[in-house]
């Protein structure tokens, strides 16, 4: 029995050693697009003023039949999308002459149906092979915020109501116009703002913190301790939020027009019982060690 056990241990050790010596080609190959076309975009704004819709369109868009496209996006934006960086506070650092170059990419996956995480993996492979991208993470400490109860008794504000419906059922139903009187009763779950009206349907505190992360352009973490999902419907102006200020500075929108509506954070404090408290957080920036020249088609 002892001989058998010893022999088994030796066989296992040999197997492990052999596996360690197997060539890298036998490891799982990185995901790749089946067909890819990369061209320099003719406009090349190089970080200049951008149209408003460029702030809302996805950097990479999925099309029917496994097709993927990205039009007029900089290498910097492609990197941020592929590596899932939060552009609100994570930076892509490197030589700006390359990072600001804008490209048109048309690609097709082998499968007719492809999911977003798979496309991100294919885009990372494209960047590292076709753009010869080499990079590393660089930690940095930045200002951040905690989402906390604003009232001394820790209670929720009067405009924050429990959500008792089913988000999955609403997601499978037809879309409802924002102007519809049935919007709150039938709309899909999420936080939607339009014309100064802010509506939340079936949102958790984590979801609110995630949206505020975008608006504040800094990490916002939920520290309310309030479980469950909520509704809210308030009038609040967001034009003074850091995201809106940055959009105006990067486009031709001009100065912020005066508004008689109360500010978003003031309304959150008075009506929802929520406030932001300053904090510090560690984030990782994406540092490009080298990139290019682009390997042409």
Image (cartoon, rainbow, N blue to C red):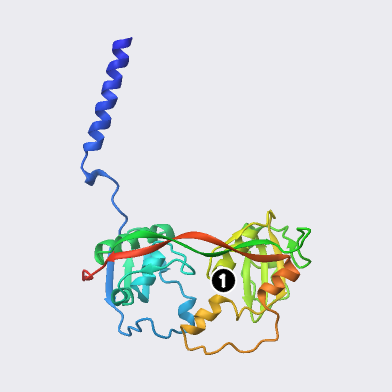
Q: Inspect this view and state whether residue 51 appears.
A: yes
- Which residue is under mark 1? 216
Q: Quadrant of residue 14?
A: top left
* Residue 112: percent from left, percent from top: 38, 60
* 202 is higher (above) or lower (below) than 264: above
* Residue at 65 percent of width and 59 percent of height: 205
The structure residue drawn at horizontal position 33% and vertical position 85%, both measured from the top left corner, is 43
Residue at (32, 70) in percent of width and height: 94
The answer to whether residue 11 is left or right of residue 247 is left
Q: Is residue 9 above or below residue 233?
A: above
In the rendered view, does 31 fall on the left or right side of 165? left
184 above or below 222? below
Percent x, y for residue 35? 28, 65
Q: Is residue 109 visible?
A: no
In this picture, residue 206 sits left or right of residue 73: right
Q: Give SS at disc 1.
A: helix
Between 21 and 277, the residue placed more toward the observer is 277
Depicted 165 relative to depicted 23: above or below:
below
Residue 83 screen position, x and y as percent: 39, 61
- Quadrant in the picture for residue 197: bottom right
Depth check: give the residue in front, 293 or 122. 293
Quadrant of res 61: bottom left
Provide residue 238's location: percent of width, then percent of height.
Answer: 62, 78
Q: Which quarter shows the C terminus?
A: bottom left
Question: What is the count of numbered marks?
Answer: 1
Q: The N terminus is located in which quarter?
A: top left
């Amino acid at each position: 029995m002892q001989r058998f056990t010893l022999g088994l241990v030796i066989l296992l050790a040999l197997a492990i050693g052999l596996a360690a010596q197997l060539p890298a080609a036998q490891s799982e190959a990185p995901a790749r697009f089946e067909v890819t076309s990369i061209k320099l975009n003719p406009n090349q704004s190089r970080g200049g003023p951008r149209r408003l819709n460029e702030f809302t369109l996805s950097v990479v868009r999925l099309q029917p039949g496994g097709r993927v496209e990205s039009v007029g996006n900089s290498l910097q934006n492609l990197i941020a999308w592929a590596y899932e960086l939060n552009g609100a506070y994570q930076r892509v650092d490197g030589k700006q002459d390359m990072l600001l170059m804008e490209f048109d990419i048309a690609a097709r996956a082998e499968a007719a149906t492809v999911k977003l995480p798979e496309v991100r993996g294919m885009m990372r492979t494209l960047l590292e092979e076709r753009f010869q991208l080499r990079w590393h993470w660089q930690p940095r400490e930045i200002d951040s915020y905690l989402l906390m109860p604003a009232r001394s008794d820790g209670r929720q504000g009067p405009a924050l109501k429990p959500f008792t419906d089913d988000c999955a059922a609403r997601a499978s139903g037809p879309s409802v116009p924002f102007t519809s009187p049935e919007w709150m009763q039938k709309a899909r779950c999420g936080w939607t703002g339009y014309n100064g009206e802010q509506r939340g349907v079936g949102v958790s505190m984590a979801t609110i913190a995630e949206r505020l992360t975008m608006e504040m352009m800094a990490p916002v973490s939920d520290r309310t301790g309030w479980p469950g999902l909520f509704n809210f419907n308030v009038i609040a102006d967001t034009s003074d939020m850091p995201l809106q200020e940055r959009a105006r500075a990067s486009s031709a929108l001009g100065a912020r027009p005066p508004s008689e509506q109360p500010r978003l954070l003031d309304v959150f404090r008075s009506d929802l019982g929520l406030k932001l408290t300053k904090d510090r957080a560690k984030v990782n920036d994406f540092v490009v060690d080298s990139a290019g020249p682009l390997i042409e088609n």
